[in-house]
Image (tube, rainbow, N blue to C red):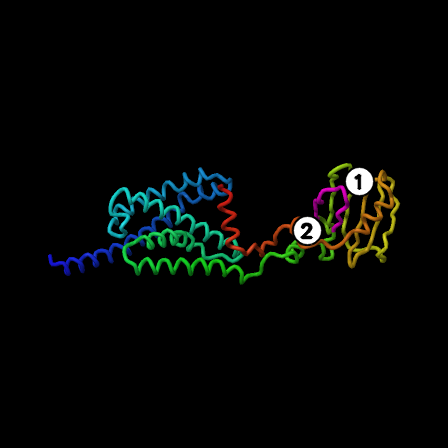
Amino acid sequence: MPAALWSRERVRVIDYRVPVQIAVVWLVMGFSAAFVGWLVLVGFFVQSAVLVVIGMAGPFAMAYLIGTFTSRGSPLTATPLPRLGWAALVTVFGLVGAVFYNAVLESSEPAEPPSWLALPALGVPFALVAAMLAHGVVVRLVAGAVTVAAVAFGTWLPTTMPGDDAASRIAHADLPGGVLLIATPEGYQFPRLTVSDGLATLDYSPSGDGGELHAFPRLVVRPATVGTAEPEYRQDPVDHVFVRRIGEVEAVAVVTKRADVEAVREFVLSVRPATDDEVERLLPVAPDRRDRDVLRRFTTTWARLF
C-alpha cells in the first residue's frame, strides 16, 4: 500500500475510533454512577478514602475494558501496560470532575437540573479526560477548551444567585421582631440559641467560675410588653429578672439570686444586635441560600479524605 494511501487510511480509522471511545466512556461511566456512586458518596460523607477507592474500582475496571475494545482511540490504549495508566487517569480525573459538578449543583441550590440529566452529566468529566488523551491535536485542544469553559461557567453560575448572609438566616429563623439580640458576658461560653413559640432563648454555660452572674444565666427575647429602654426589675422568688425594651422586642435576663443584682442589670444592658459572624454561629443557612463559592466547596470535599 502506498505511503500516502496508508496514511489516509490510518487517519480515517483513528478519526472513527476516537469519537467511539469518547462516547463509550461517557455512557458507561455515566451509568456506572447508578451502581457505585452511592458508595463513593458514602466515602466522602464519612471521610473514608478507602471507601472512595473501593467505589471507583468498578469504574476503573470498566475504563480498562473500554480501552481494550477501543484501542485505536488513544495512543495510551494501544498496549496493555499504558492502558492501565489511561484507565487510571480517566478514573481519577473523571472523579475530580464529577466532584466539581456536584459542588456546582450544591452551590446552586435550590435550583436543580432535570433528574433525567443526572447520569449523562456525571459521565461528561470522564469523557473529557478521555478526549484529552485521545489521538489528534484538535480533539485534545477542543476537550481542553471545553473543560476550561465548563469550570469557569460552573464557578460563575452560582454567584448569580442570592448567597448566604445574616439577613437571610434571621428571616428564615422567624425570630421575634426579625432581629437577633445577644450578650456575651465575661466568663461564659458562646451561648446556645433556641427559637420556639415566638421566643428566642440564649442559654449560657460558664467557661470558668461563671464570673459575677454565677451558674447558668438565660436571656429571653420576645415581643415587647414594656415601654422603656431602661431595665425594669421584676419580682421573682427564685431569680433576678430584668426586662429591657429594644425596638419592637424586649430582652429578659433571668439569673439566679446568687448573682449580684447590679451584675444582672449590666448583663441586660449589654444586650445588642448580633454581628454577622455571631449570626452565622447561631443560625443555620436558609434553605434557599447557600455558600456560592464552588471552589471552596470543592476543595473542602477533597480535604475530608486527607
Kind of residue at disc 2 = Glu
Question: Tag 2: Cα neighbours inside 10 Å, few (<14), some, or many (≥20)?
Answer: some
The residue drawn where x is 87% and y is 40% is: 237
The residue drawn where x is 41% and y is 59% is: 148
Label 2: state its secondary structure: helix
Verify CB contact (< 8 Å) between mark 2 and mark 1: no
Label 1: state its secondary structure: loop
The residue drawn where x is 30% and y is 54% is: 134
Q: Is residue 61 magenta?
A: no
Instruction: Give the residue at the far left of this rendering.
Output: 1
The residue drawn where x is 41% and y is 40% is: 53
Tell me the residue that label 1 is attached to.
Answer: 211
Q: Position of residue 64 (x, y in %)?
A: 30, 44
The range drawn in magenta is: 182-195
Q: Main secondary structure of the magenta part?
A: loop
> Which labelled disc corresponds to residue 105?
none
Q: How many marks?
A: 2
Residue 103 shown left or right of residue 202 in the figure: left
- Which comes sooner in the sequence, label 2 or label 1? 1
Q: Position of residue 93 (x, y in %)?
A: 39, 49
Q: Position of residue 22 (x, y in %)?
A: 31, 54
> Which labelled disc corresponds to residue 278?
2
How far apart are the alpha carbons under marks 2 and 1?
22 Å
Residue 261 shown left or right of residue 48 in the figure: right
96 w.r.t. 247: above or below: above
Point out the image quarter for the N terminus: bottom left
185 w.r.t. 292: above or below: above
Kind of residue at disc 1 = Gly
Question: Tag 1: Cα neighbours inside 10 Å, few (<14), some, or many (≥20)?
Answer: some
Q: Position of residue 23 (x, y in %)?
A: 31, 54
